[in-house]
Image (cartoon, rainbow, N blue to C red):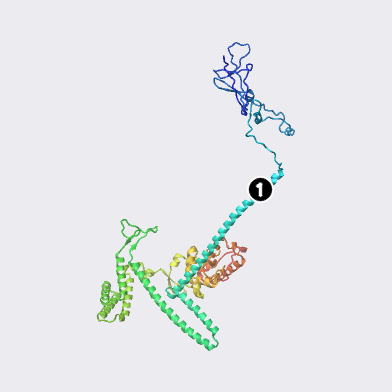
Amino acid sequence: MEHPLEGTQDWDENGAVHPLPDDSSPVHYEDPVNNTPITPQENETPDFIPTKVVIDPYTGKKQWLGGWRHKLNHNEFHNAETQTNRAIKKITCERNDRDAQTYEYKNVTFQTSQEASTQMTKPGHYVSTRDDVIITPGEYTLADTIAKRRNNAAIVIQKYFRRYLAKIITAQLKEDREAYENWLEEEKERIEEERRKRRQKNLEGRLNPRSKKDFDLVWAALTSWRNEQVALIRANSETLAEQKAALATLEEQVAQLVAAIGRHKIRANQETKDLKIAKFLNSCAAPRKWKAKDGKWISMVNWTGEPGQFEMETGYTLRAKELRDLYNALKMEGLNREERIDMLLTLKNIVAGVPDCKLTKELIGLAEREAEMLVRGVNSSLLNGLRARILHLYLQFCRDPKFNPEAARHLTVPQDAEALRSKVVKMGSSSNYLSHWPLAIWPYAAPPNFELTAAHRGKVNPNPHPDIIDIKQVMKELKKKYPDSDLVYVMAEGDIRHLVLNIWSMKSALSHTQEDLTLCKWKKSESWSPWNCFLITKREEEAHASFASPEDGYGPIMFQKVHRKHLQARQYFSRVKGMSRFLRERSLGDGLCQEVTGVSLI
């Protein structure tokens, strides 16, 4: 009868064969019902008595030393040596004792798991040596040598890393330098382009003057040319008689140029007058438009006109359009006799609607007189004076709200005297009647004699270089940059001219250049005033605005220079009665209130 357990030949990882157990070795059984191991006792009946065996589970790393497998349920059983935990050595002494914390060196032999499974070649068993490696000991390396080698390697790594960082920084610096050079070139080109455009604009203004600025350029150029010629004559003249003759010839040339400038001024005034008249008539004839509170044009459903706008013609606008068309027709030249007579008849029919008026009666009489002369065949060149008189009277007719009701909305001065009552103020020093609207908007802006500004009281030289700096443009920039400052709206053009020309000498306080100048604040924390201003270029203004206070960017010399300019401005503008309240400053030094203007403010 075959034993229910059969030993299996197991091979370890080195190829060793473990022998089968003999018959005398103890045999373990397992209860097939409870799956618990049982052991038969001596001198007992063939019936097995089950006995429970307590097994201490092994928690460490098992070594493979062979075992057995059940043939029926294929359960594996290992040697008891691998199933027993190692005993834990108990420490009986106190751990905080000095002697217990001192380790005593011992030499103990220990067989590792690698050696436990090592199998050598022997009779009956062969182990291949194909994967064996022969190790030859090398030269022994000291710890100091290894540390030195590591230190040298770290130095090399740092060297290359610092080189990498230096290359990055150098590349960035090169890019910044290139960008800066490009910016300098662009700024240089921009400044040259602005100069070229300014010269071209000034040249066009001198060749064909139209505005007051253009004539200022012409007068400045004439004055400069005369001074140069006078200096040249005095330098080259040998005798006094020769010098006087050359100066007399120069004065004749200057007189001719002045006469030419006067003719240009008359022409420019006439052109400006015609443009104003055309603008007035076009404004009266324009259809009505409305805007909502948000500033957008009021739209209308199914509107067929210009998108986004709603326009409406009224009886007044149609009347104004008819009067405008007739005015343009009366101004036309080159009409034949029949066309001119037709225009005069149209004028007579329009004017005849109001017969009981001196203006309409005079217009009708002049129109009939011209028509009669045309019928008689009088030359048209002899009727220029009569036609100019008719055109002038007809323009008065178009401006009168009785004949053109739409004109009342566009007239600057109301035609009704009652509309001016309680709206004008008489100035005590000049006895002029001026509108009181500055007092309504800025109560401090118009003292009783506000027309006598510092520029009118004192002598202010004209702008010697109108082609370089424009005083009106400087005023516009001031009002745009500092709308919260009161004195920006009080000062007139002559005051700003005196401030720029006489006090700051029309030069930048930093670079002493005369181009692209602007007035800015000296101290940001205070409002703009003539004693808190700084004349510099627009490029320098950007750098000045980056400082929180002047102490951050300027030294004592600049402070003394600016303070002297501010004192001059205080002394000059203190003559204006309305500025006295702005000139008082209180200082906390010694706890006293001190006046810093140098003149009486009362």
Does the image show residue 543? yes
Q: Indicate left or right for 506 with 438 as reference.
A: right
Residue drawn at (57%, 61%) of the image? 549
Q: Residue 223: x, y in percent?
A: 49, 78
Left/right placement of residue 254 relative to residue 347 reads: right
What residue sits 30% from the left and 73% below the top? 329
Q: Which residue is more in the foreground, 197 or 59?
A: 59
Q: In this view, does 19 lie to the left or right of 601?
A: right
Q: Name the spot of residue 359 as percent of width and height, x first.
A: 30, 75
Q: Is residue 72 above or below residue 230?
A: above
Nearest the camera: 193 or 525?
A: 193
Disc 1 designates what residue?
153
* Rendered location of residue 509, percent (x, y): 56, 68
Query: Is 387 in front, or is 583?
Result: 387
Screen quadrant of the C terminus: bottom right
Q: Where is residue 389 in the image (x, y as percent from the top left)?
A: 32, 78
Going by the numbered disc 1, the residue's amino acid type is Ala
